[in-house]
Image (cartoon, rainbow, N blue to C red):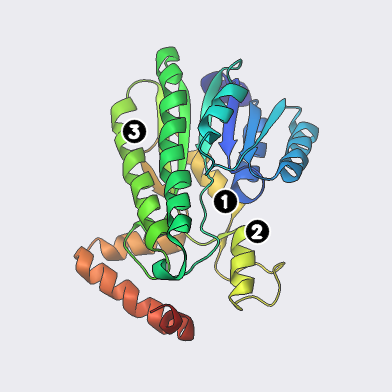
Amino acid sequence: MAEDFAARYGPWGIVAGASDGCGAVFAERLGSQGLNIVLVARRQHLLDEVAADIRRRTGAETRTVAIDMTDADAAQVIFDATADIEVGMLVNCAGGDPNFRGFLSSPVSAAEALVLRNCLMLVRLCHHYAAPMVERGRGGIVNFTSGAAICGGRNLVTYGGTKAFDMVFTEGLWVELHGSGVDVLGLVLGMTDTPALRKLEFERGRLHSPDDAPEGAVTAESVVDVALDNLGRGPTVATGDDVQMGLDLFRSMSRNEAVRLIMKASSELMGTDARQDD
């Protein structure tokens, strides 16, 4: 029941990466479960639209924090904006890579920005908000990771590395907080239908229009369903058949074998794209 959910994870939840896709859906779902929501992302106008929709649909109170999570003071801005409220749920779903380019095809600053946003910001937010959750003996933390974390692959060098960090970090946090009343869950996402993925696939020539859904992608709604169904059953859960198949396949392989398989498959799948980035 919504009352039970709000008592365990409320009264406020924070969703980082809430302007669209999984983050917007997650924020709305938390609102429907009785939580007030702090929405964090870069684009104020999109945050305002999502916040207004949540208020209209659920009656939840909302706050928006428009901040680039690669800014040096981003964490402190978020902390200051939430200093007067009790946060019982933290959802970290910011951190996609919009470029899908070879490591040496982008400036090192692009890689550094991914590390800051996907790793350091996640660590800072978890450390800040988990402590009072443990003191209260209740709360929840959901960190989005990726199938790119399973093993290294082309055009995902830094992104995959950051998501591997997120996965292991979340599992370790689950171990340390297990029994404290704070539920920790890592979501390993496969191909998920979001505006960012549609834009990337259209730019790569794999979609006729950015309004088309990528073939084989799961919906953001199904990802949030998996998260809420498994909250309290951590530490890690896969959200798509493609990721689950990869986990099952690689379980029987050495890491070297898995990486070579991914290398061969990506070269065959991407063709000229793969050769261009070699």
Distance from Cα at disc 3 to Cα at disc 1: 23 Å
Q: Is residue 171 above or below residue 109?
A: above
Q: Please name which of the two marks, 3 or 1, marks the residue nearer to the observer.
A: 3
In which quadrant of the rendered image does the C terminus lie?
bottom left
Q: Residues within 10 Å of mark 2 (few under 14, many from 20)?
A: some
Write down the residue under mark 3. 174
Q: Please name which of the two marks, 2 or 3, marks the residue nearer to the observer.
A: 2
Q: Amino acid at mark 2?
A: Pro
Which residue occupies 36% across, 39% down? 170
Question: Which residue ends up furthest to the bottom in the rendered image?
Answer: 272
Write down the residue under mark 1. 222
**Residue 33, can we see it?**
no
The reply to whether the C-beta atoms of the residues labelled 2 and 3 are less than 8 Å apart is no
Q: Could you say which disc has been placed on residue 195 in the image?
A: 2
Which residue occupies 41% across, 40% down? 120
Q: Of label 1 and label 2, which has the lower sequence position?
A: 2
Front residue of 109 and 159: 109
Q: Of label 3 and label 1, which has the lower sequence position?
A: 3
**Residue 14, can we see it?**
yes
**SS class, disc 1:** helix
Q: Position of residue 246 (x, y in %)?
A: 35, 64
**SS class, disc 3:** helix
Q: Position of residue 159 (x, y in %)?
A: 42, 57
Q: Amino acid at mark 1?
A: Ser
Q: Residues within 10 Å of mark 3 (few under 14, many from 20)?
A: many
Front residue of 194 and 100: 100
- Horizontal relation, residue 86 to residue 176: left or right: right
Q: Please name which of the two marks, 1 or 2, marks the residue nearer to the observer.
A: 2
Distance from Cα at disc 2 to Cα at disc 3: 30 Å
Q: Of label 2 and label 3, which has the lower sequence position?
A: 3
Which residue occupies 76% across, 39% down? 48
